[in-house]
Amino acid sequence: MIAQNDEGLKADTYGWDTVFAIRVDDVNATIKRKGTSPNTFAASTQDPHTAIAVDVSGTFSDWQITLGGSGKLIHMQTPVTALKASGTIPGAGPVAFTFGAGSFEIEIQLQYVPHTETPATGSGTFHDLKVRHTGASPQEQVVTVLDAYGFGTSTDPSSTPFESVVDDVKATMQNWFNANLIDFEHVFATVNLNRTADQGLFAWLLPTYSSYAYVDGPTLDSSVLGILCMTENRSADGLDQEISPNAIPQGARAGFLIAPERFVTEMLWPSMAIVYKGTQPGNFALNSDKTGLDLANGEVTIDSLKDSDGNSHETVLQNFELTTSDQLLTVDATTRVQVSPGIHAFTHTVSSYGLALHNNTSSGKQSIYYVDKSSIPPAHWTEESEGVEITKILEGVAAALSTLAIGVATDGAAFAAAAIVMGILSGVGSKIPDLIAAANTDDSPSIDLLVFNSVGPLQWTDQADFNLVNVSLNYSVQMGGTPNFNG
């Protein structure tokens, strides 16, 4: 289970457009499989104040991420199978100690390093996520030795406690790590920046800038390391290197997040003029936190409804809120229809939809369906201006128009849910009207293009593929999957 924060299981991207997260246990297992840790070390220092000279040498086993890091700071355990410490003390002569297994804990940062290998797709540039081993100036320390522990008492006849030499050993190892961190050759992940979208689609999803972040969980298996991306050359200025502890859904080994602003802007906003005929995209606007849509300038007239006699009745979308919260897409809409001068019929609907994976029976491939989760029944009523009396005939007209208006609102909400599904699967909002009829049918597109264009440019080392196990609206569009690391 991934650690929960104060916001429950909300998977926030904290302003990043996309996030690809894996569990730290899987990162550590890959480090072991690849054998990318340094084998040995040897370093010397001399204390400028005491003139004590210290030599430290030994053998490493596999380095591992350990608990304690946050954001851009990664804590690593660097286990040592055997350690020798020797030195010369002015006035006392040489001393030498041999210790058994122990470990140094260091704090490091990562960075993306471009390389010249050409992507198989023929577009973009590969960047490897590796340990940052060079500072901005010669004085900058790129590593901090936080602790040295587990070495116990020396195995030589002196039986010297490690605590008596720990400060000198740590100072010496600080110099070694700072000078030799490049020897930890592990590539955590590879990102293809500025790749051209497959079939000209998904351009809004492909990374143009990337960073990373780490967050602690109670255990290493619940701790998360993630790739953070911006798309379409959108700026990351002001964004923190931060990742949600809920980025990976329960039951999954990895999680891919699409920020709400991205899918609302790319998938939903272009569809509103189709959902509510007679409107324009400019009649709607992102809400204050960019996770949904509101009316931009108050109520807006939509296409008139017609009664059974073919008479047109002015119809107004009086209130409208589209939100993505509580794992639901919810459309809260109020419409007003003029039955006759001075008489109006009102409807209020709250429609909610979730997302779910579905196996198409005809193709045998996975797709995404939307699922009706509505729980609030629609309401309707009439209001008459002062001095106007509604007749039985007009009551019937009002009831019929209310039924039509409810249909407009609920069908519109379903269309919006379908727009998310088809937009995510096809990668382009402008083609949603042509694709919408295929939603929730065996003709619905498979997830293949989605996975290729979302996860494809972001590859964790040793990742074989990314098999989806669930999909939901969890503040972000959240896709949980299994990376199938080669083990």
Image (cartoon, rainbow, N blue to C red):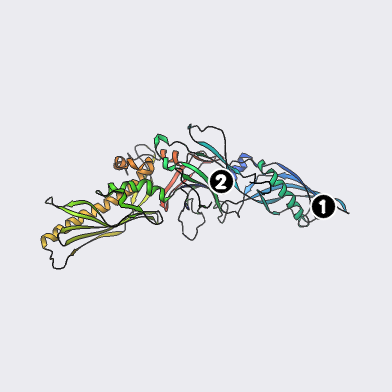
Residue 303 vs residue 234: left or right? left
**Spot occupied by residue 259 in the image (x, y as percentages of width and height):** 43, 49
Secondary element type, mark 2? helix
Q: CA distance from mark 2 to mark 1?
A: 43 Å
Q: According to the image, label 1 marks what residue? A: 52
139, 346: nearer the viewer: 139
Residue 83 spot, x, y in % from top left: 75, 48
* Residue 158 can be seen, yes or no: yes
Count neighbours of disc 2 (C-alpha within 10 A) and say few if under 14, some if 14 to 19, many if 20 or more. Answer: many
Instruction: Compare residues 200 and 341 and report the one nearer the observer.
Output: 341
Q: Earlier in the sequence, mark 2 or mark 1?
A: 2
Residue 243 vs 451, above or below: the answer is below
Q: Nearer the viewer, residue 17 or 288?
A: 288
The local secondary structure at tag 1 comes to loop
Q: Tell me if I can see residue 369 in this picture.
A: no
Q: Residue at x 38, y 49 (%)?
A: 264
Quadrant in which the C terminus is drawn: top right
Percent coordinates x, y for residue 345 in the rendering:
19, 60
Residue neighbourhood size for the residue with mark 1, other residues' Cα within 10 Å, grouped as few (<14), some (14–19), many (≥20): some
Question: Residue 376 bears which disc, if any?
Answer: none
Q: In the rendered structure, are the residues bearing label 2 and label 1 in contact, judged by CB atoms less than 8 Å apart? A: no
Q: Residue at x 75, y 55 (%)?
A: 167
**Residue that mark 2 sits on:** 26
**122 and 10: which is toward the camera:** 122
Would you identify the image quadrant in which residue 41 lies? top right
Q: Is residue 369 left or right of residue 222?
A: left
Q: Amino acid at mark 1?
A: Ile
Question: Which amino acid is tagged 2?
Answer: Asp
